[in-house]
Image (cartoon, coloured by chain):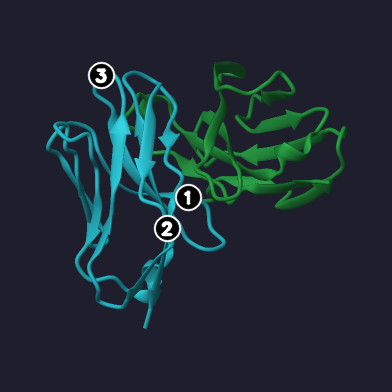
Chain colours: A cyan, B green
Amino acid sequence: GDSVTQMEGPVTLSEEAFLTINCTYTATGYPSLFWYVQYPGEGLQLLLKATKADDKGSNKGFEATYRKETTSFHLEKGSVQVSDSAVYFCALSGSGNTPLVFGKGTRLSVIA
Amino acid sequence: DAGVTQSPTHLIKTRGQQVTLRCSPKSGHDTVSWYQQALGQGPQFIFQYYEEEERQRGNFPDRFSGHQFPNYSSELNVNALLLGDSALYLCASRTEESGGNTGELFFGEGSRLTVL
């Protein structure tokens, strides 16, 4: 079945450091790919998405490019802030009305 | 505009008991999904409701059941609780027309269930 593998955390960075969180997937067909973020005490919220190969999703300085050849959707940000501290989940949704499949999540802590 | 609201936020039960969790979807949303998030894991799909019917179901036993009401709100029921049912239960909603595999899901903050 469909699955998502993302790098294990926790990840601790200093403010203004470069962030990469790796995500790879296994799926049949042409899934849509998502990054969701869970801030402390809040529900999951969509950070960005890409629905076809080579699409780049971006939001709040975060970016991820849908790479079909490497089945990857790595999350990047050039300069993290303390307010980016959260748990980040990579997810996919397969063809048709299929439910989201999530990775295990990566906890990011940014220190001043 | 209220987002997805869930109740209760926390609850403690003992093995063998039954629990009911409630969810009100975001205004204008008609499709509700439930997810289980165990500690340190990503959310896992339990089931989805639309037009008061269970439309899709994940790999969960029949002890997990649900309901959707005419106002689109939903309940998740778990019978004969096991220690392994301890988790954060998340409700998510969207509109049917935004569905397929491109739509955004809106999540509530979850109900944290502890089974002793």
Give the chain letter at badge 2: A
Looking at the image, is B69 positioned above or below residue A70? above
**In this rendering, the label closer to the viewer, 3 or 2:** 2
Q: Judge by depth and name the residue closer to the eye, A8 or A53.
A: A8
Looking at the image, is A12 positioned above or below residue B110? below
> What amino acid is found at the position of numbered circle 1 in the picture?
Leu
How crowded pointer 1 is (Cα within 10 Å; few <14, some 14-19, many 20+) is rated as many
Residue at 42% across, 32% down: A100
Quick one: quadrant of the N terminus of chain A?
A: top left
Q: Secondary structure at mark 3?
A: loop
Name the spot of residue A5 as percent of width and height, x first. Answer: 37, 40
Q: Are marks 3 and 2 in contact (CB under 8 Å)?
A: no
Name the spot of residue A76 as percent of width and height, x first. Answer: 23, 57
Q: Judge by depth and name the residue closer to the eye, B60 or A34.
A: B60
The residue singled out by tag 2 in the image is A9
Q: Secondary structure at mark 2?
A: loop
The residue singled out by tag 1 in the image is A44
> What amino acid is found at the position of numbered circle 3 in the picture?
Gly
Looking at the image, is A11 positioned above or below residue B80? below
* A26 sits to left or right of B50: left
Q: Secondary structure at mark 1?
A: loop
How crowded pointer 2 is (Cα within 10 Å; few <14, some 14-19, many 20+) is rated as some
Q: CA distance from mark 1 to mark 3?
A: 26 Å
Residue at 74% across, 30% down: B77
